[in-house]
Amino acid sequence: MRTQVAIIGAGPSGLLLGHLLRQAGVDCVVVERRSADHVLGRIRAGVLETVTTGLMTELGIDARMKAEGLIEEGFNLASGDHLIRIDITALTGRHVTVYGQTELTRDLMDAAPERGLEIVYEAEGAALHDVEGDAPYVTYVKDGETRRIDCAFIAGCDGFHGPSRKAIPGRAVREYEREYPFGWLGILADVPPCHPELIYANTTRGFALASMRSATRSRYYIQVPLTDRVEDWSEDRLWNELAARFDALSAHGVTRGPALEMSIAPLRSYVFETMRHGRLFLAGDSAHIVPPTGAKGLNLAASDVAYLSEALIAFFKAGDEAGLAGYQSKALARIWKAERFSWYLTKLMHRFPEDGAFEHRMQAAELDYVASSRAMQAAIAENYVGLPL
Ligand code: APR
Ligand code: PHB
């Protein structure tokens, strides 16, 4: 098979890129290792910046997002038993939309057939070839048969564990990494949220986040030691811990219900420089990871894809190579600022095992300063709502 852009990975990056290219008449094929159901089984964050909702609108795949997404004009940081409301709309004139990554992915998958976006699911062993030359290609195995896609460019949208980043030789790259000494234990349940807006809480028992998917579905997380496994946590134990961290802060207290999902995710900051090697471009989690504090992961994938799609379309429609040459510096400038904000909020809101009384006072003093300073609140709000493209 021959196409213009072979896209590896059908997460948000690969699907958004595929749709944007198809809408502009650029040929592409998406190759995904898992089944569609498996991809949709992953529960990820759910706070969308206008960059992300804007791309869905540009694609005309925004009807359900507009109907079901919750407009959030503010969110809260909590210090001890005190809520600090960050009034995003008063401070920036904008808002964020709460709509699960799973739902956005489902909308993009559902719209693929009618828009002629080909997605090959359950494609095993995807491998990248000749990315340094003029005629790269991708091979994979489907139904026991090896298949080959010849293309002009390969887009590596295959997440942190995919093969694309590994196809770039070590001499061409530099990696930056920070691992955090804790994970987030999350629970999704059909119970009303404990508060109308998100709460990121720094409590003496550790960090906790109260989030939601709708007026009847809640998403909570707590900071847990890296050694904890999900089997160590019964639903009762987790609800007790959430009540201990949120009952004093929230409007209605924590309502309990059966878990639809419970999982633990480690926290990491990671940037891989370079995002281009020959005819291979990386986008999304294949090139960078942020800790979930601040919900930047999906939104950074969207901004990468906004830059990359524009550059590829300019190349195929007008022979213009400037966009492709500028992709990595444009994308990285935004990525590093989102890395900074996610790292800052992680440091401010978690209990680090190595921290003592002095560091706890520093966190409390900084939160006290945030509570009293409109300038600090404006800086947090403009990062949370998303920096301009
Ligand atoms: N061949 C084909 N597909 C692959 C391969 C492979 N060898 N390896 C991984 N993939 C697929 C994964 O199965 C996954 O569906 O690539 C996709 C990558 O999707 P994500 O991990 O969701 O990454 P991305 O699309 O960049 O989205 C970033 O999603 O992971 C979250 O928190 C992250 O919100 C962020 C956003
Ligand atoms: C979520 O709702 O899953 C969520 C919200 C905000 C975050 C992370 C996750 O920062």
Image (cartoon, rainbow, N blue to C red):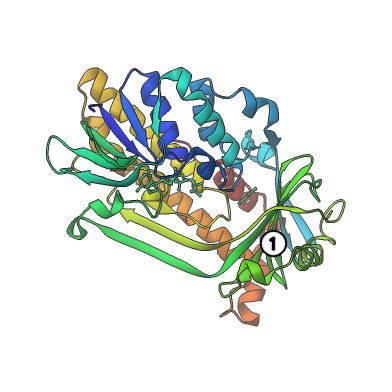
- Is label 1 in a helix, a strand or a loop? strand
Residue in the image at 28% along x and 42% along y: 140
Image side of residue 313 versus residue 23, left or right:
left
**Quadrant where the N terminus lies?**
top left
Label 1, ligand 2: CB separation under 8 Å: no
Image side of residue 333 versus residue 106, left or right:
left
Image side of residue 24 versus residue 186, left or right:
left
Considering only vertical position in the picture, is 53 above or below 377? above
Can I make out residue 199 in this image? no
Front residue of this view, candidates 359 and 297: 297
Front residue of this view, candidates 315 and 227: 227
Can I make out residue 270 in this image? yes
Considering only vertical position in the picture, is 103 above or below 233? above
Picture quarter containing residue 389?
Answer: top left
- Amino acid bearing label 1: Ala
Front residue of this view, candidates 51 and 282: 282
Residue at the spot of label 1: 208
Considering only vertical position in the picture, is 26 above or below 359? above
Residue in the image at 24% along x and 22% along y: 316
Specify the farthest residue to the front.
Answer: 144
Residue 222 placed where, x, y %? 67, 63
Residue 29 placed where, x, y %? 33, 30
